[in-house]
Amino acid sequence: SQQGEEDPQALSIQEGENATMNCSYKTSINNLQWYRQNSGRGLVHLILIRSNEREKHSGRLRVTLDTSKKSSSLLITASRAADTASYFCATDAGGQAGTALIFGKGTTLSVSS
Amino acid sequence: NAGVTQTPKFQVLKTGQSMTLQCAQDMNHNSMYWYRQDPGMGLRLIYYSASEGTTDKGEVPNGYNVSRLNKREFSLRLESAAPSQTSVYFCASTKGRAVNYGYTFGSGTRLTVV
């Protein structure tokens, strides 16, 4: 069952531009996480935001969380070609899934130079 | 390097054959997970082990079995492979509850069943 759903499915931008991708989820959560997956590789954990936080930064990444709208956004500023990857949000469905995360289908970001 | 190691990286099976996918982590993590990734479907949870000695079914457990051999190792077995099991399989681990710490993923096993 899909908990998080990313939007858009695909995004193409130029180097130096900002990239914004969104995640909507269905049930209450404890935390929300974002992951990156480069082509042919495993996922890499980027950032975790707790349900009582509204915004979090890590380098060029900015994540926001709006629990009233059940949505989160990931902003990558000053994008680089190396940011080309798929990005996934993941949640825990408020504990109903035990200790396992449920992933969305991802946003594919392409950054061209 | 510390992390999650999956073997093999690639495998081709004939329908009906069996195989075991191996996963080992050296980070002293408590919880381990198996996901499959199919185009357009994202990652779907097959089985997980919240701690040594326990295993639980995920969203798509049919056709699979798992063994938490010890704290380090968590294997996934396909008893009678089917073409529908063609996928990329990822193992992941986490220190405690995934919701609090996030996952460390292996590099995946790309399985083709013909």
Image (tube, coloured by chain):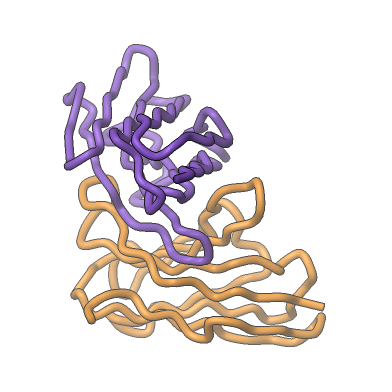
Chain colours: A purple, B orange
Residue visible at 25% across and 37% down? A61
* Along the line of sight, the residue nearer the viewer: B55 or A83: A83
Residue visible at 31% across and 83% down? B70
* Along the line of sight, the residue nearer the viewer: A11 or B78: A11
Q: Pinpoint residue B30: horizontal percent, then vertical percent.
A: 24, 67
Which image quarter holds the N terminus of chain A? Answer: top right
Q: Pinpoint residue A94: horizontal percent, then vertical percent.
A: 35, 34
Q: Does B5 sit left or right of B8 as displayed?
A: left
User: Furthest-front residue in view?
Assistant: A113
Residue visible at 74% across and 77% down? B81
Q: Pinpoint residue A5: horizontal percent, then vertical percent.
A: 52, 32
* Quadrant hosting residue B5: bottom left
Residue visible at 30% across and 53% down? A45
Q: Looking at the image, is B101 positioned above or below residue B19?
A: above
Q: Does A99 sit left or right of B78 as displayed?
A: left
* Along the line of sight, the residue nearer the viewer: B41 or B80: B41
Q: Looking at the image, is B50 positioned above or below residue A107?
A: below
Q: Pinpoint residue B12: horizontal percent, then vertical percent.
A: 71, 84
The total of numbered circles placed on residues is 0
Which image quarter holds the C terminus of chain A? Answer: top left
